[in-house]
Amino acid sequence: MTALLAALVGNPNAGKTSLFNALTGSRQKVGNYPGVTVERKSGRLALPDGRIAELVDLPGTYSLSPRSPDEAVTRDMVLGRQAGERRPDAIVAVIDATNLRNHLRFVLELRRLGLPMVVALNMVDLAERDGTRIDVEQLSRILGLPVVPTVAVRRRGLTELAAEIGPLLGTAPATLASPEADIRLLQREARVIADTVTAQHGAAKRWTQVLDGVAMHPVAGPLLLIAILFVMFQSVFAFAEVPMGWIEAGIAALQAQVSALLPDTWLRSLLNDGVLSGVGAVVVFLPQILILFLFIILLEQSGYMVRAAFIMDRLMAGVGLNGRAFIPLLSSFACAIPGIMATRTIDDPKDRLTTILIAPLMTCSARLPVYTVIIAAFIPATNVGWFGLQGLVMLGLYVFGVAGALVAAWALRRTVTKGPTPTFLIEMPKYQWPVPRDIGIGLWQRAGAFLQRAGGLILMITVVLWALASFPKPPEGSAVTPLSYSAAGRIGSALEPIFAPIGFNREIAIALVPGLAAREVAVAALGTVYALDGDEDQVAQSLVERLRGSWSLPTALAFLAWYVFAPQCLATLAVVRRETGGWKWPAFMFVYLFAMAYLAAGATYWIARALL
């Protein structure tokens, strides 16, 4: 029997994702649509009659005439043209009760298809708060569709909505009508309907105006954004220290147990020096990564993220982009892959390509383990006035990356992606309190993805590196160290002359190679290499202590500079290839980032040597 399928459709900022989370809870899975890298979120919806339906959250769009790849996926899915996906049995059209005129136009366009549909009139609490009252029954009669008032963030109207969805499933027509229509006529009809069903109009949204007076002020707005980012990066250090200590203690306890239970064989070395020293060196940074994701989720759910994009529009225009590029770039602070995928909302092809090419310069969460371990080893945990020096250095690295991205964008827009700067138009969402449930789901999904990556890709690479760094063994009585005699040692020695001019030693050269697979693997690689290259007392030391005794300060600073611009991971290259349709732009990206990283690390190393 074919599974029942319903699709959530609506304009951006209609509250679709909150409604999706409320209807499906933890019964969700995230992937990509077949053949494209647009995120696909689906979940199980329990219907009142006992049936289970699949609910798909489609990307937000303003019409079935797409202006971006993201909107094209929604159009193709609704019309049954999406490769590898079947047409939904019913549509749940989500509209914003506080912006009825604009959102109804899309409902009228969807209605022309003839698919079974129910309208979720979301955010009715915000409309009521503003003094707006909508006659829901009259709206339902005019549209000829069931209309259910909902407040997704408070879980209001969910039972009624599910009850309306159930009877619609299984009644879809074999063919659909043409969606083509005069958008101006639909907008005019939507305006008439909105005026008819709005029994009482709300007063001016004073709080929104007051908040926007600060958040979008030409002077106060940028200062507020800088303050928010500063607090975010200070928090990454301040609040993560204790849970990181717990994880470190747990890993040390596991290593002690392994040493106590197993004899000094290759198996004990694999578990202690490979798995626990390598993977553990990455897992310990989970608290910092979750804090970073927490801030990003809060900014998105509160409605501030779009306003930050508006504030950044003037700066972005100076380098040939516009404010719409800011949201994908800010998302890239978490991971460049979803940031690159988010560029599908950018209309102009050259603007989108430029954003893709500079997205890896945003300091993604995979760099956090690298930054943290080097800063902890070489930057004193002292205060500069009211602020921690380590947090200030972390902020400086992020600023350095952003500055590099802007310079790269300026150069790209005047050479390989030359073209006019497109106009920036975007709808401002309402301010809302973030929903704890949605925050929890978001953090749970990201923690799971990080641990899955640590237990999969990073574990595999660490074990391979351990094997390369452990074998072959030197002959009995040889004066050559085991690491130098091993395959990894020989690879590192071959690469060392390339990186020696920028202050990197053999161990760093070894770590950079697996670091191409995933940036955080560099920390795991350093943990494994130094664990294998030390005696028992040195192995018992943390990676921070081992680096402090092995590297000079100029080398440490050069290593940080390298990772500000470090070539992106293989997964990012693969996504860029899919987004751009070939290997031309991924190859270009790899080469120009490698060159920037090498030059930045070299300049940092030699300037630091001259000054220190």
Image (spheres, rainbow, N blue to C red):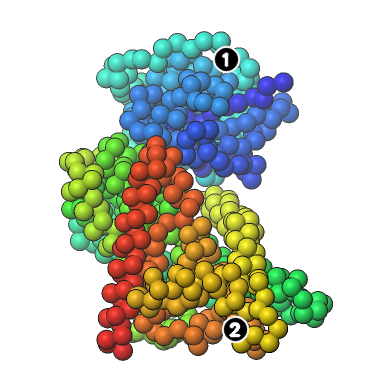
User: Eyeballing the image, is 80 above or below 584?
Assistant: above
The quarter of the picture where the N terminus appears is: top right
In the image shown, does 216 or 191 lie closer to the viewer? 216
The answer to whether residue 362 shows anywhere in this view is: no
At a point 58% along the width and 30% down the height, the residue shown is 161
Of labels 2 and 1, the one closer to you: 2
User: Is 393 positioned to the left or the right of 412 in the image?
Assistant: right
User: Eyeballing the image, is 472 above or below 302?
Assistant: below
Query: Label for residue 470?
Result: none
Residue assigned mark 2:
480
Label 2, label 1: how many angstroms apart (C-alpha)? 74 Å
- Report helix, strand or loop for mark 2: loop
Determine the image quadrant of residue 221.
bottom left
In the image shown, does 453 or 558 lie closer to the viewer? 558
The x and y percentages for residue 156 are: 56, 39
User: Eyeballing the image, is 21 above or below 90?
Assistant: below
The x and y percentages for residue 443 are: 55, 55
The x and y percentages for residue 131 are: 37, 39
At a point 60% along the width and 73% down the height, the residue shown is 486
Q: Amino acid at mark 1?
A: Ala
Q: Amino acid at mark 2?
A: Val
User: Eyeballing the image, is 349 above or below 556?
Assistant: above
